[in-house]
Each structure stands twice: as structure tokens, then as C-alpha cells.
Image (cartoon, grey):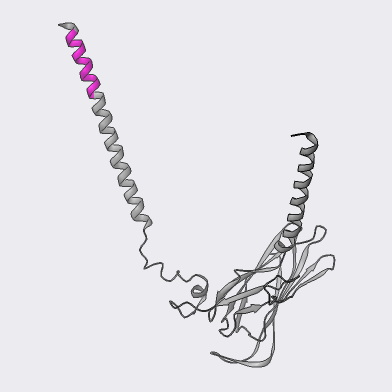
Amino acid sequence: MPLSHARRLATVTAGVTALTLGLALPVLAHVTINPNSAQQGGFTKVAFRVPNERDDASTNKLEVTFPVDHPLAFVSVKPVPGWKVKVVEGKLPKPVTTEYGELTEAVTKVVWSGGKIEPGQFQEFEVSMGKLPTDTDQLIFPTTQTYTGGEVVKWADEPKADGSEAERPAPVLKLTPASAEGDGHGAAASTTPTAAAAPTTPSVAPAASASDGSDGTARLLGGAGLLLGLVGTVVGALGLRRGGRAS
């Protein structure tokens, strides 16, 4: 290939790569909720994953707004080293009837501050919450990200009806109907449905390991026997040859 053609090809390849990365980075840089789905009517644990998008500033504050149209009766947070956390409760626009009674107040906001997410890094902020509503298929958590330089980025756009991605999408937790095997009670029921059945579920792995061990031993003994047989045959043949020469 002529050198000029090779240079052109390299230039085009570099341009396509840069364009691809440029299109992909904004998607990867969104504040997201992980996992992004849970069962209706149960409890779940999620993590708000926050990447730092700036090269010249650190993220030092995160504010997550909780839904008040479908309030959550129980919310607890996992401590994050180096960060302060504040759980804010407030009055609901209108009372909500739950199995625990009439709910007039609920967690409306959780704020983490004081720490740093450096350029090129991300941090996860974990929350346990429930019970998840059964009359909606999603919960939206508008989130505000603040940088050390004073810049404030709001991730608050709701999902678009046509399925396309919003410019600054808010974290969304999708809710799916509870499985027929369980009623959604407890964190294990919504996050690890098979955990409760694990002790009574027979394990196949130990049996397979034992079988593999037996086969290996049998093959080893068989191989050793074959080797000894071959040695005996060789020794016998040598003895016969020597006997023939002596006579």
C-alpha cells in the first residue's frame, strides 16, 4: 500500500474513533441507579453511581430527590467514607394510605457532601428502601451534582415517550410485577429471589467433583498398571534374548 494511502487510512480511522468516543462518553457519564430494576411491593438496595465528568474539578456534593407521589416508607443509607449524609423528611402533598397506615411524611431528599470524586473517578452511594409501590412501573429520582468550581449539573429529565434518551436523564428505577414464587417481602425477596431456597436446593457441584476425582484416580491406577505391564514385557523379552545367547 502506498505511504500516502496508509496515512489517509490512519487519519480516517482516528477521526472515526474520536467521533465514536465523543458520542459514547456523555452516555457513560450519566448519573445512574444500579441495579435499574426491582420488584413491586418489596424492598431493594440500589446504588446511585456518580462519575466525574470534569478534568479540572471534583464532584463534592450529590443531592437525590425522592418521589412524593409514590413515597417510600423506609429509607436508609450506607455510610460512604469521607462523605457526610443528610436524610431529609418532609410533608407529602397529600396523605398516602399504606399497609402501615396513613403516610403524611416521607423522605424527600438525601444529600451527600464533603467528599470528593476526582477527575477520571466515580463513586457509588447506596440506599436501602421500600416498600416499592405496586401501582406504577417506575420511580424517578431527579439528581443534582455539584463540582468544586461551583458548577451545578441537574440530572432531572424524565424519560421520553418515544424511548429516545433525554439530554440530562434522571436516574430511573423500573418496577416489575412480583414473581409468583414470592410475595416481595424482605430485601432478599426483591434482590436475590433464590437466596432463601439455596439451603434446600441440592448442589450438583460436589457430586461432579467427586466423580471427577474417582475417574481421575481410576485412570491413574489403570495407567500405572499398563506401565508396569509394559515394563514386565520388556524385562521378559530381555531375559529371553539373554537365555538364547547363553545356549
Left or right of residue 100: residue 69: right
Point out residue 141 in the picture as x, y percentages from the top left corner: 68, 76
Q: Tell me if 133 is positioned left or right of 29 in this view.
A: left
Quarter of the figure that contains the C terminus: top left
- Point 78% across, 50% down: residue: 15
**17 or 182: which is nearer to us?**
17
Which part of the image, by quadrant, shows the N terminus? top right
Name the residue located 37 percent from the left edge and 61 percent from the top edge.
Answer: 203
How many callouts does the rendering have? 0
* Residue 33 sits in quarter: bottom right
Of residues 240 and 59, the one drawn nearer to the viewer in this rendering: 240
The x and y percentages for residue 173 are 62, 74
Counting from the top left corner in percent of width and height, residue 71 is at: 63, 85
Query: Residue 146: x percent and y percent?
Result: 79, 69
Q: Residue at x 52, y 71 (%)?
A: 191
Residue 197 located within the stretch drawn in magenta: no
The secondary structure that dominates the magenta segment is: helix
Query: With 134 as the anchor, is 158 left or right in this view?
Result: right
- Seen in the picture, residue 219 relative to 177 is either above or below; the reply is above
Residue 48 lies in what quarter of the image?
A: bottom right
User: Toward the viewer: 93 or 113?
Assistant: 93
Is residue 7 depicted above or below 192 in this figure?
Answer: above
Q: Residue furthest left?
A: 247
Q: What residue is rendered at 78% in x and 38% in y?
A: 5
Instruction: State the extent of the magenta-drawn residues as a range.
Output: 232-244
